[in-house]
């Protein structure tokens, strides 16, 4: 163990055993033989196996159950060296297809060069009794995968990027993950990796991407569009987009206009004239917005027949609730019975809650199954309390999950498996973003 003044403590040693390893995110708990004693090290260390030599930088922490542990922030991996380390590494099962017996035969045949042979000259493995050409390829591919993960971690360490990126990058790009990042560092700023654009941009420049390179210009434009989604803008006027990106990258605007043309040709943006402005969209947002407009247009044009006894029902509801509706309140409740879509709006104290309770009571009297939802948990709780019934978030209503292959948010309820309700009431609808509104509308029967 070593520690420079003002720096985090450092541990060095050989991995003696793996206690736990999460294959999804690489979080690992292991025992490190530091010479005089063994220590527990925790952190993101994907693919680390017994027999490897590690240098870890981090801090000592105390776990309530497991006691003192070393939490690693920076991990440097060194391949096993010497016959003993190489054998221990191979015998640990770190390489698929190699057990203790095969490890002994490999070390006896190739000595300290066993790992180099596995990676670079797998045909030689067939010299070992019981290793067919097919098994040799399997062993080599498994080891190369580990080496790819190792090199990815070395790259992340070198550029002060989180080690937690290694697993999602490898899951997305496989054996070519490092090449993918080197060829386009801006992919790190995508939602699935979450690196700040400024950090991805700094990496790109460090790797030799020129300041006005097409890759950088295009990435900057797409970043501005994506970033402004969080500010409530489903599109940006082309002029504002180019000006903002020019300021971000210090690139002439005419070069960025060229990049807009390129992105449009590739289908990575959509341009449309809106109110005299050239609007620039991300394709998925454009498609969602068009779908919302079409669906609401269809719903608003389709009138429903209200129940014949509507007046009688409204009298009963007012009597039960101990109120008499104002003219506009009654109009709102009546309209809810004859429309597929209705927007109820008004300032504080204008009677929206009374209308809402009336609509809910009317739907119940009509035998309709109604779901109440809101965009946030707090809003849903408030809605439920106001209506004295259960309400949920829109995400919960649509039964949110994650696609294991893409890691993206998905909804179980959609056009193929719609909501089993007759009506949906959404409170605080101005807070609902475009993709979520499109998902909700697609889940309506």
Image (cartoon, grey):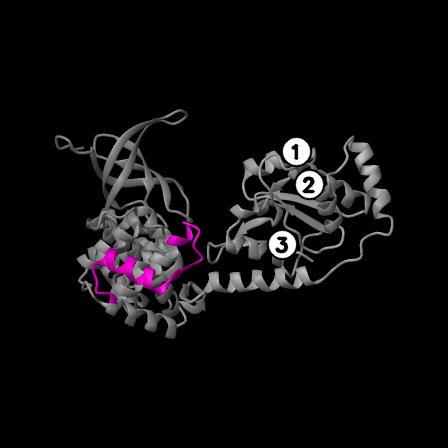
Q: Residue at x 46, y 58 (%)?
A: 406
- Residue ID for mark 3: 413
Q: Which residues are magenta?
A: 228-253
Q: From the top left corner, tell me how far across and down residue 15 is, in percent.
A: 28, 41
- Residue ID for mark 1: 386
Q: Residues within 10 Å of mark 1 (few under 14, many from 20)?
A: few
Which residue is the extreme one toward the left?
A: 5
**As drawn, is 348 to the left or to the right of 42?**
right
Task: Give how far apart the Cα atoms at labels 1 and 3 are.
Answer: 26 Å
Marks 2/1 in contact by CB < 8 Å: the verdict is yes
Task: Give how far apart the Cα atoms at labels 2 and 1 are.
Answer: 9 Å
Q: Residues within 10 Å of mark 2 (few under 14, many from 20)?
A: many
**What label sits on residue 356 in the rendered view?**
2
Mark 1 or mark 3: whose residue is earlier in sequence: 1
Q: Residue at x 19, y 58 (%)?
A: 205
Q: Is residue 153 above or below residue 329?
A: below
Q: Residues within 10 Å of mark 3 (few under 14, many from 20)?
A: many
Given residues 99 and 328, the one toward you in this image is 328
Q: From the top left corner, tell me how far across and down residue 438 is, in percent.
A: 56, 57
Given residues 273 and 395, the one toward you in this image is 273
**Callout 1 secondary element:** helix
**Picture mark count:** 3
**As drawn, is 245 to the left or to the right of 294?**
left
């Amino acid at each position: 163990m070593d520690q420079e003044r003002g720096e985090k403590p450092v541990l060095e040693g050989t991995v003696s055993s793996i206690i736990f390893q999460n294959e999804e995110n690489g979080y690992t708990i292991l025992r490190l033989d530091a010479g005089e004693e063994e220590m527990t090290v925790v952190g993101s260390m994907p693919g680390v196996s017994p027999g490897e030599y590690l240098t870890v930088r981090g801090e000592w922490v105390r776990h309530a159950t497991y006691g003192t542990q070393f939490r690693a922030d920076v991990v440097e991996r060194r391949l096993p060296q010497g016959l003993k380390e190489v054998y221990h590494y191979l015998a640990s099962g770190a390489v698929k297809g190699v057990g203790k017996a095969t490890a002994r035969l490999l070390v006896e045949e190739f000595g300290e060069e066993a790992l180099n042979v596995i990676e670079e000259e797998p045909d030689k493995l067939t010299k070992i009794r019981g290793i067919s050409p097919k098994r040799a390829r399997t062993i080599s591919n498994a080891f190369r995968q580990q080496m790819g993960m190792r090199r990815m971690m070395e790259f992340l360490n070198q550029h002060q990027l989180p080690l937690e990126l290694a697993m999602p990058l490898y899951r997305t790009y496989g054996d070519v993950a490092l090449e993918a990042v080197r060829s386009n560092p801006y992919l790190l700023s995508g939602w699935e990796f979450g690196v700040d654009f400024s950090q991805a941009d700094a990496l790109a420049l460090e790797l030799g991407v020129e300041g006005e390179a097409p890759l950088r210009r295009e990435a900057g434009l797409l970043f501005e569009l994506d970033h402004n989604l969080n500010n409530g803008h489903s599109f940006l006027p082309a002029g504002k987009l180019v000006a903002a990106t020019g300021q971000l990258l210090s690139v002439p605007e005419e070069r960025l206009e060229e990049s807009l043309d390129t992105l449009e040709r590739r289908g990575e943006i959509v341009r449309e004239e809106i109110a005299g402005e050239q609007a620039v969209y991300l394709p998925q947002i454009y498609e969602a917005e068009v779908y919302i407009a079409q669906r609401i247009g269809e719903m608003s044009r389709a009138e429903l027949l209200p129940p014949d006894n509507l007046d009688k029902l409204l009298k009963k509801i007012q009597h039960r609730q101990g109120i008499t509706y104002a003219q506009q309140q009654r109009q709102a409740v009546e309209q809810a019975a004859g429309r597929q879509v209705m927007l109820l709006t008004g300032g504080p104290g204008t009677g929206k809650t009374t209308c809402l309770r009336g609509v809910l009571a009317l739907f119940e009297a009509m035998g309709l199954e109604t779901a109440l939802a809101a965009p946030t948990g707090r809003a849903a709780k408030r809605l439920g309390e106001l209506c004295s019934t259960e309400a949920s978030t829109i995400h919960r209503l649509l039964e949110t999950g994650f696609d294991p292959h893409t890691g993206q948010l998905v909804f179980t309820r959609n056009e193929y498996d719609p909501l089993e309700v007759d009506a949906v009431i959404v409170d605080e609808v101005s807070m609902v973003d475009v993709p979520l509104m499109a998902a909700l509308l697609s889940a309506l029967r």
